[in-house]
Amino acid sequence: MSKAGRTAGLIGAAVGVLAAGAAAGVAVERQVIGRRSGQRKQLEAEPFGSLRGTPHIFTADDGVELYVEVDELKRSRRPAPPPKRRLGRKLPLPPEDLTVIFAHGYGLNMDLWHFERRDLAGIGTMVFYDQRSHGRSGRSPKANISIDQLGQDLYGIVERFAPTGPVILIGHSMGGMTIMALAEQHPELFGDRVIGVGLCSTSAGGLDQVPIVFPGKVGMLARALATPTVAALARIPDVVERSRKAGTDISYLLTRKYSFGSEVPSAFTEFVNEMIAATPIEVIADFYPIFALHDKYDALEPLQKVECVVIGGDKDHLTPFEHAEEIVRRVPGAELVEVQNCGHLGLIEHHREFTAALLGMIERAEQSLGHQ
């Protein structure tokens, strides 16, 4: 491979990691000496990506086909889950028609929710979907790539897969922004159909003021250069994709630095890489600019009508914890949870803490039904 190709791949990897907050430009790491065998053993111990539900195809209002999986609540057949999956707590039986819908973040797919899907099994019917252009979903026209369109997609998912009964919405990063867009477009749902919201490692706005790579002015310059750099790389996708598939130690380190805030098993990093390896550079380029435009502070008011928890990591460089604090300031009564030594992918890195906080919100939301 030419030096230019390697350079393009490395730049694409670095910008992708920073932009997605989940190593969106990094290929599966296979060239680090002494790491591969250990990763394989860990992956075998925790079967990432093996949790599957009933598949569906949902057609969005603009014709894009979204891939959806549904884990049905089968009360009569549900075995008693292992104690670890209840996080040391005994769950009450959920309402018969409770639906919990999960929206993932940029550069990822529904498998992001592996631990939550495992440990919340039986809490209700659970719906997972790949956002447009991500995972198994169809590619979106560039003109229809926006946070508002993602909110419209979620509205369609709610109508199709939760036509009746109480609904809980949980979103990570871009998925949290998706919920905010839905709240802006359909505030009447909140406090009526939607009874609970979980916002994980996300922001309501001001991301254009968050430096990347370096702190201060240098980091802001890097942010300014990121959009044209990604756009330029998208014009040579073949070169970039070959470089991404080759893998480098530097890309691996970038993944760990910007996804996690503590030492994690190598398998966690590889799991992230495998989730995003199929995210084309064109998708990274098309979605990246929408985050600088994201401003949903005024859309947060409907969340005051439901049980809400906002969870973030103290070492999240992509959606800093101050953004979680600002959301809670505008949603009085929402619970704020700060997870220590935690980066942007706390759902994986500190999954027990995140799942416990989400479970607490779900239980409170269910209890609120009895007081209505």
Image (cartoon, rainbow, N blue to C red):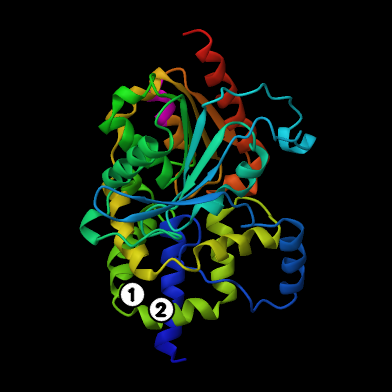
Q: Nearer the viewer, residue 145 or 310?
A: 145
Residue located farthest toward the left when viewing the structure as drawn: 143
The one of 279 and 31 positioned closer to us in this rendering = 279
Disc 1 target residue: 233
Q: Is residue 324 left or right of residue 209?
A: right
Of marks 1 and 2, which one's residue comes earlier in the chain? Answer: 1
Image quadrant where residue 214 sits = bottom left
Q: Quick one: label 2, few (<14), some, or many (20+) residues within 10 Å? A: many
Q: Is residue 259 left or right of residue 351?
A: left
- Tell me the magenta residue range: 326-331
Q: Taking 314 as reference, is 145 above or below it?
A: below
The image shows residue 184, relative to residue 217, as above or below, that is: above
- The x, y position of residue 191, in whole percent, is 39, 19
Q: Position of residue 76 (x, y in %)?
A: 68, 30
Residue 214 visible in rendering: no
- 99, 301: nearer the viewer: 99
Amino acid tagged 2 = Val
Residue labelled with disc 2: 240
Q: Please say whether residue 365 is one of the residues in the magenta stretch.
A: no
* Residue drawn at the location 46% of the way across and 70% of the way down: 13
